[in-house]
Amino acid sequence: MKRLILTYAIGCYTLFGIVFVWLAAFLQNVGDLRGPVEDSLAVSIAINLATIVLFGTAHSVMARPAFKRLWTGIIPPAAERATYVLQSSLLLALIFWQWRPIPTVIWQVDGVLAWMIYGVFALGAAVVLLSTFLLGHLEFVGLSQAWQNLKGASQRQPEFCTPMLYRVVRHPLQLGLIIMMVATPLMTAGHLLFLVAMVVYIRVGLHFEERVLLREFGPAYAEYRRQVPMLIPNPFRRVYRGAAAE
């Protein structure tokens, strides 16, 4: 059973990697992944928003401590994080697969400026990946939990720390995702719909996530939240040092 959980976690992680590459391709419209127009504007908006709402609802509900307690009574605790990664990957893939294009062009640039925008996009992707590694990439994707379970070791308890990017904004991973969504040389109405809907979801989701973090880490997180902006870096603020030594 322990080996099966590890194999399951590796499979979920592999899918996660594939879907992250698909996300990058989707946002840059590689191979015209958003396809030709097939439906009316109203139908396209409805389908697109429905898939995003489905993703956001499942993603947020499964992250809540109450759901985790219930869920780990059904599945092995060591497989909980990998399952969370699996559902996120599958529902993101559903968005890309079922996306209905709205091709009205908002902006389009070429040449050097386009390559500069690609550079910003790559920076956003790097921020996303670095953010996961700063707090433990293998734990973030569920591999660490499965491996510790295989070895019979106890699971690491969450610790409050603020390495590198987390001293600039509280949620650098989400900032990186927003940069990726904005940085495109071809912005269509459909892409803008995706951007706005996902930013709204991110902002709402972070509100509930921070409530959990406040309960878990108490005054330390409250002080961190007071000093460090949520998503938008403030160049006029001193870099946060409060938890640097932890």
Image: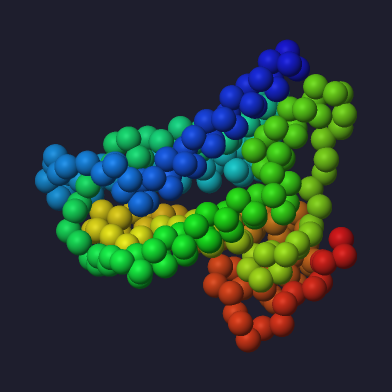
Residue at the far front in the pictured view: 111
Residue at the (64%, 38%) spot, across then down: 141
Residue at the (15%, 44%) spot, across then down: 37
Q: x and y percent of residue 85 in the render?
A: 57, 36
The answer to which image quadrant residue 72 occupies is top right
Q: Is residue 9 above or below residue 117?
A: above
Q: x and y percent of residue 126 in the render?
A: 57, 56
The answer to which image quadrant residue 220 occupies is bottom right
- Please state which of residues 213 and 28 is positioned toward the viewer in this rendering: 28
Q: In the image, 198: left or right of 160?
A: left
Can residue 47 be seen here? Answer: yes
Q: In the image, 204: left or right of 213?
A: left
Residue at the (71%, 82%) spot, across then down: 238
Residue at the far top in the pictured view: 1
Quadrant holding the C terminus:
bottom right
Q: x and y percent of residue 222 in the render?
A: 73, 69
